[in-house]
Image (spheres, coloured by chain):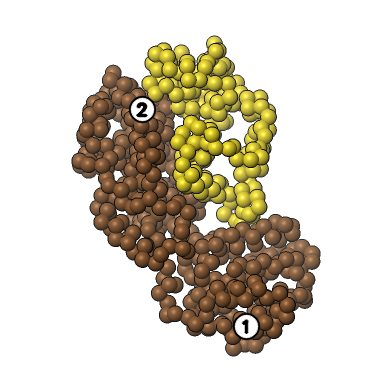
Chain colours: A yellow, B brown
Amino acid sequence: MALVLHAGKTNKNAYKALIAAEYSGVDVKLAENFEMGVTNKTPEFLKMNPIGKVPVLETPDGPIFESNAIARYVTRLIADNPLYGSSLIDYWMDFAATEIDAGISRWLYPRLGFQLYLPPAEEAAISALKRALGALEPASCLKHLPEFPHVERYFWTMVNQPNVKKVVGEVKQAEVVVPNF
Amino acid sequence: MALILYAGKTNKNAYKTQIAAEYSGVDVKLAENFEMGVTNKTHEFLKMNPIGKVPVLETPEGPVFESNAIARYVTRLKADNPLYGSSLIDYARIEQWMDFAATEIDAGISKWLYPRLGYQLYLPPAEEAAISALKRALGALNLHLTSNTYLVGHSVTLADIIMTCNLYPGFSHVMTKSFTSEFPHVERYFWTMVNQPNVKKVVGDVKQAESVVPVTRKPSQPKEPAQSKPKDEPKKEVKEKELAKPKAEPAAEEEEAPKPKPKNPLDSLPPSKMIIDDWKRLYSNTKNNFREVAIKGFWEMYDPEGYSLWFCDYKYNDENTVSFVTLNKVGGFLQRMDLARKYAFGKMLIIGSEPPFKVKGLWLFRGQEIPQFIIDECYDMELYEWTKVDISDEAQKERVSQMIEDHEPFEGDALLDAKCFK
């Protein structure tokens, strides 16, 4: 029986579980007719996740929320899953959350009108993000023009993996920064 | 043998690991003489964690950073550790609440507290948004704890340790009784947790804030206005910072606290008759007869007491096999030298018409040594051999002149490019 994932169709936090499921051969389906801002406000949904955020995974043992926790659960469903081969994985996952996602969110979401847009806060977010991206680069030079060449190479390699592409589709790099909402 | 944890003594993110270690019977010791803002800026430390944040755990298999990852690692050292539950679903829920503690609770408290402590830009509307997001998160947590003593199952798990540590700076600095009374189950939970013997042993006595910690610093521009700042301002900030210190200390967080800019020691050197900006202007404005005007002018201006000249020579020239990569490397170096603009001038030559290209440079620095802050902040420095120029040696002096004027051929080779830092 497929596990049901509650989230919109193009939610990057849902992608995490969906991609892990592709790699692991676990059957995960998006909930039908999920509507962001509506479905997740219902009492049924709030019973699954009291803060009303997506994604939420329904499992035979009950619901799980927080996207990384869901992805971990899906991954662990397969014994000795090579996706979980090293203890280093935990800290890169945390780095992705606390440094990369936090920086990008604080830059992007205010522009999309999801959060308050404050130019100095945006500037601070961008500079924290640059610091984080810089830490992904090896400590040698080669950091200029493009500034994060290894991150670029890594990202394009990843989004072209068949299991990733199947979930995410074609990815195009922004030509301009999304304008302020 | 004890695992060594690098962090200050009262860091809530280090507490996570220390408490998990207490519960798990794992021997973890804090690194001795760790000094926040100093130890974590050293090359050794950056090798362990490239972003330079604490805590970092040294293990026999190498360093682990990110506080939750460290706590997980320590927890896993004990086989079938009950801190990690006993089933896959327990495990997933523990992870879920750990993530919730990070993305909802910690993020909310940090965005409220750190700007007030002066670690981040303080913006009242941003604070308001942070508080309202935090309230939403605490509301959800409160609801869950209405029918659960602990986050997952019936005993303390790693999720409770992480949650408690993340709530701790909130309770001790900003979340006063009148704020938390809206969330009675969170209150009950927090006080239960901090009174667990294993938690108390690490954290000590916890007291709830009686008032929200005051803003320690006026809103300022996020871009470091180091160059244009009026001179007396940094001093004032230091004072304010010191006043706030007793309160600020316990919250030394993963976010390394950007201390108010101390005065650059180079500013306290005896004044020099050489005005570096005058030289830079002369360099930029000389279009013709460079040797007679700019070079001659340089040697007239040069003050060997207030400044020193240095040759640098890239240590790994045989790796410079691709022209644009080599140019980018030098460009990146100059970009990273931005912090030294007030105190330095540099020329970098990329030499040769065929790979491998040689990279050699000339730098003028304020003072008699390569300024320590440049060595600390710009990792490119160690990729070069540095030799102080002896200007009593005419040959060296001539080499300086040639480097400033992009003399071609340089030491018998054509120049691929020459870049200037001014």
Image location (x, y in percent) of residue B118: 35, 51
- The residue where tag 1 is placed is B297
Q: Which residue is drawn at 40% across and 53% down?
A: B220
- B96 or B299: nearer the eye? B299
Image quarter of residue A176: top right
- B194 or B291: nearer the eye? B291
Label 2 crowd bin: few (<14), some (14–19), many (20+), radius 10 Å = some
Image location (x, y in percent) of residue B4: 38, 50
Q: Give the residue type at disc 1.
A: Gly
Find residue B387 and name its label.
Answer: none
Residue B35 to residue B135: above or below: below
- The residue where tag 2 is placed is B136
Question: In what quadrant of the picture does the C terminus of chain B appear?
Answer: bottom right
Among all residues in the image, which is located at the extreme top?
A1
Does the image show residue B2? no
Q: Give the residue type at disc 2.
A: Arg
Image location (x, y in percent) of residue B202: 26, 43
The chain ID associated with circle 1 is: B
Does the image show residue B377? yes
Label 2 and label 1 in one chain? yes
Q: Residue at x 36, y 66 (%)?
A: B232
Image quarter of residue B81: top left
- B232 vs A58, left or right, is left
Image location (x, y in percent) of residue B355: 77, 63
